[in-house]
Image (tube, rainbow, N blue to C red):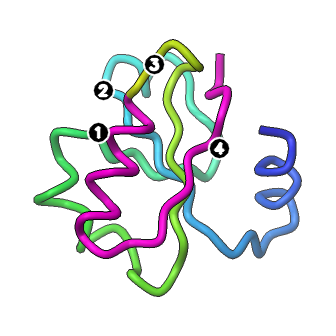
């Protein structure tokens, strides 16, 4: 997470950070400048929120949450270049 934070603080991170959790979790806490794209909404909303030319990093609560992994898979299947932020925001 620290490398993601430093990149976001630079103002030009070279990626989009995607929070794959649901609305309640997003409202409770999220990383500033992240895009909220819950897993269930990826097929319908990814194209309107993400540029296929910009790499995506997914995250969720933490290592016990597989939401970031599922989001990364769904986005990769749509053709996005994706990495998962290990550790989440917990």
Mark earlier in primary sequence (3, 2): 2
Residue 72 or residue 44, whichever sits in front: 72
- Residue located at (34% from left, 45% from top): 71
Tell me if mark 2 has few (under 14), some (14-19) or many (20+) residues whose alpha carbon lies within 10 angstroms of its own: few
Residue that mark 4 sits on? 32
Label of residue 65 in the image:
3
Tell me whether the residue at label 1 lies in contact with that at label 2, contact meaning CB atoms closer than 8 angstroms.
yes
Q: CA distance from mark 3 to mark 2?
A: 16 Å
**Separation (CA) of disc 2 from disc 4:** 15 Å
Residue position marked by numbered label 1 in the rendering: 38
Given this view, does label 1 or label 2 mark the residue nearer the observer?
1
Q: CA distance from mark 1 to mark 2?
A: 8 Å
What residue is shown at x 40% (from left), y 80% (from top)? 51
Q: CA distance from mark 1 to mark 4?
A: 16 Å
Q: Which mark is residue 23?
A: 2
Q: Nearer the viewer, mark 1 or mark 4?
A: 1
- Lower sequence index among marks 1 and 2: 2
Question: Are discs 4 and 3 less than 8 Å apart at CB?
Answer: no
Boundaries of the magenta span: 67-90
Q: Please tell me how crowded label 4 is: few (under 14), some (14-19), or many (20+) other residues with Cα within 10 Å.
A: few
Q: Tell which tag, 3 or 2, sits nearer the viewer.
A: 3
Specify whether 52 is left or right of 28. Answer: left
């Amino acid at each position: 997470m620290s490398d993601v934070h430093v990149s976001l603080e630079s103002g030009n991170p070279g990626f989009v950070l995607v929070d794959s959790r649901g609305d309640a979790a997003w409202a409770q806490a999220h990383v500033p400048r992240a895009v909220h794209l819950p897993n269930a909404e990826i097929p319908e909303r990814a194209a309107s929120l993400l540029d296929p030319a910009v790499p995506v990093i997914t995250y969720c609560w933490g290592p016990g949450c597989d939401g970031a992994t599922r989001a990364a898979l769904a986005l990769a299947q749509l053709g996005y270049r994706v990495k998962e932020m290990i550790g989440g925001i917990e």
